[in-house]
Amino acid sequence: MNHAVRLGSLEQLGQSAPKANIHANFERWKGLGNGKTAVVTGANAGLGFFAALGLAAAGAHVILACRNQSRAEKAMAAIRARVPEASLEFMQFDADSLLSAMALAAELRGRHLDVLVTNAGMIRTPATREVGLLGFERTMTTNVIGHARLIGELAEKFREDSLRLITLGSMSTLLMRTDPSNLRLEKDYSPYRAYVQSKAVLQSLGIGLDHRLRQLQWPARSVTVHPGYSISGLTPTIEGINEPDFAQRLKGRLQGSFAQGKHEGSVAIVEAALTQGLERCAPGVFFGPQLTSKGRISLARPAKVTRSKVLQDAAWELFVQANEGLDPFAL
């Protein structure tokens, strides 16, 4: 692994750099998804919708794992309007429920699975601490714990298939300190801290799992991405999917120099799912915009704390708790 690719342009993997947004990359990704099945949680809106759109355009069969079926059906209609030949399916998933994670895993266990995008999550966090699963606050519950159980339930897939797990980190992990000893936020709770710490844990879990898979010599990879600063106000209007009001559009224009649309931020997700040459990347691969908040997708450097043993150990302990004290990836 001395010569493994760690940082820099995707051109190091023997391909050209991706274009700026989902739609501009349809030709680039064409055929790369043929014969593949991809699951995208929270695919009815935001980054998840555009990731599902990109994967469908690439030829993959895309399972939209969403809490609300009617919203998922609107998303599928919007995808088919842009990709008439899209192969799509709905499955129920509520990221705030361990039972829902177990039920989705039961549906997927008998299916061949190539890509799992753990996108569903909470952006508008509670103003005050709300208790969620396992005694953690609700943002950690929704962004991490439900997905942790889903991943654990599907561990055998990681042994059997060249599955790619895509976890969504955040550039916010660079902006606020994460305290591994206070992941429950029983003190010093704030909505933004809750969001940042949940993303730091998810990011750290994804990075740590990729190292674990390499140690186990299993064929799967865990790829972590961050979508930059992607906002609705710079995202195309799609009825029922993204309908920003005047204030959001104005905010988008004012932030345009350092922000981008979700149709742009989601390019990192699809690239991580489909890019060729991933076997040349070092463990802990991390995709993100070249300019951190926006820009061309490259192999980036995650926040130092998410690479630290202290947070990775804490994240793995949470993962084991979410799986009833069992480690599905035990060495």
Image (tube, grey):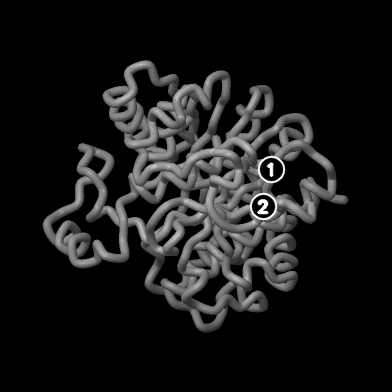
Give me the residue at 55% from left, 59% from top.
Answer: 300
How many callouts does the rendering have? 2
Of residues 210 and 158, the one nearer the viewer is 210
Q: Which residue is label 2 attached to?
A: 5
Q: Residue furthest top?
A: 85
Of residues 55 and 62, the one nearer the viewer is 55
Q: Residue furthest left?
A: 246
Residue 142 visible in the picture: no
Crowding at mark 2 (Cα within 10 Å: few <14, some 14-19, many 20+):
many
Of residues 290 and 117, the one nearer the viewer is 290
Left or right placement of residue 129 versus residue 124 in this view: right
Give me the residue at 84% from left, 50% from top.
Answer: 215
Numbered disc 2: secondary structure: loop
Q: Which residue is label 1 attached to?
A: 221
Where residue 277 sits, quadrant-wise, is: top right
Give me the residue at 46% from left, 51% from top.
Answer: 297
Task: Inspect the image, locate mark 1, and give the three-letter code of the amino acid beneath it.
Answer: Arg
Sequence-earlier tag: 2 or 1: 2
| Residue 90, image x, y percentages | 45, 27
Where residue 38 sits, quadrant-wise, is: top right
- The Cα atoms of the two marked residues, 2 and 1, are separated by 15 Å
Of residues 181 and 37, the one nearer the viewer is 37
Numbered disc 1: secondary structure: strand
| Residue 62, image x, y percentages | 48, 28
Left or right placement of residue 75 versus residue 111 in this view: left
Q: Residue furthest bottom?
A: 188
Up the image or down, 270 lies above or below 327; here it is: above
Q: Which mark is residue 205?
A: none
| Residue 22, image x, y percentages | 36, 39
